[in-house]
Image (spheres, coloured by chain):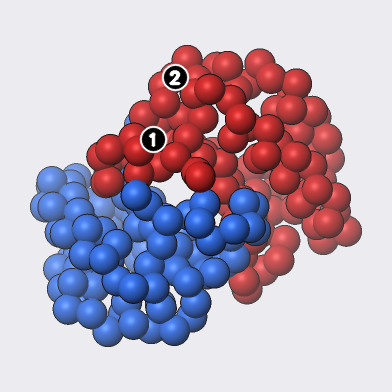
Chain colours: A blue, B red
Amino acid sequence: MKSIVVKIYVKEEYIEKFKEITFYNSENSRKEPGNLRFDVIQSAENPALFFLYEIYKSDDAIAYHRATEHYQKWRDTVADMMEKPREAVQGFPICPSDESAYKSL
Amino acid sequence: MKSIVVKIYVKEEYIEKFKEITFYNSENSRKEPGNLRFDVIQSAENPALFFLYEIYKSDDAIAYHRATEHYQKWRDTVADMMEKPREAVQGFPICPSDESAYKSL
């Protein structure tokens, strides 16, 4: 499994539009065969701060995701909505260790 | 629901001990009645960088968590293991919106 944690600061005037296109990306990404989760988190203290929490079965599943129409539409649409460049950290989900614990129902 | 995303830089010599006590905290936290998830992520690029991804049913469930023996043991044990103060962001899981999508199996 591989994870991606993304931290995104959105320009205040784009918060609602950002949520709309990000929900579209999340919902479609969760239908990919190699995706296990795609959660969208909004900060309680700063509504312009978001996290994406993505879990994939493999590096190949991440490559598949990046080639999808929904991901590319998201990436292009949000480019001008961000307050500063987003930070993405790839990693390994190490606890729990079982793939079944990550799959969104 | 409430989320907590925690970013932690661990001193290199404590990586294995940090994983051990954090797995203990994760496994016990997932048994709390108000906990939905407690995932531990290790960065692929920097093995000393970790994220905790925690989802609770409510603020009360977070208060319950902080009063547990396993959380307090974790907090006290890792205090000297960190390279710098950890960053924790509380928020709202907004997509998916259904509680059942977050529960670890």
| Callout count | 2
Residue B63: percent from the left, percent from the top?
55, 17
Up/down of B16 relative to B79, above or below: below
Left or right of B79, for residue A98: left
**Which residue position holds label 2?**
B59
Q: Give the residue displayed 38% in from the left and 67% down from the top.
A: A35
Q: Position of residue A84 (x, y in %)?
A: 33, 61
Q: Measuring 80% from the left and 48% from the top, which residue is drawn there?
A: B20
What chain does mark 2 sit on?
Answer: B
Which mark is nearer the camera, 2 or 1? 2
Q: Nearer the viewer, residue A21 or A99?
A: A99
Residue wearing tag 1: B91
Residue A50 image position (x, y, % from top left): 33, 48
Tell me which amino acid carries mark 1: Gly
Amino acid type, label 2 = Asp
Q: Quadrant of residue B32?
A: top right
Q: Is residue A40 left or right of residue B82?
A: left
At 62% from the left edge and 51% from the top edge, which residue is drawn? A96
Q: Tag 2, which secondary structure? A: helix
Q: Residue furthest right?
A: B13
Q: State how far apart marks 2 and 1 are (Cα).
A: 11 Å
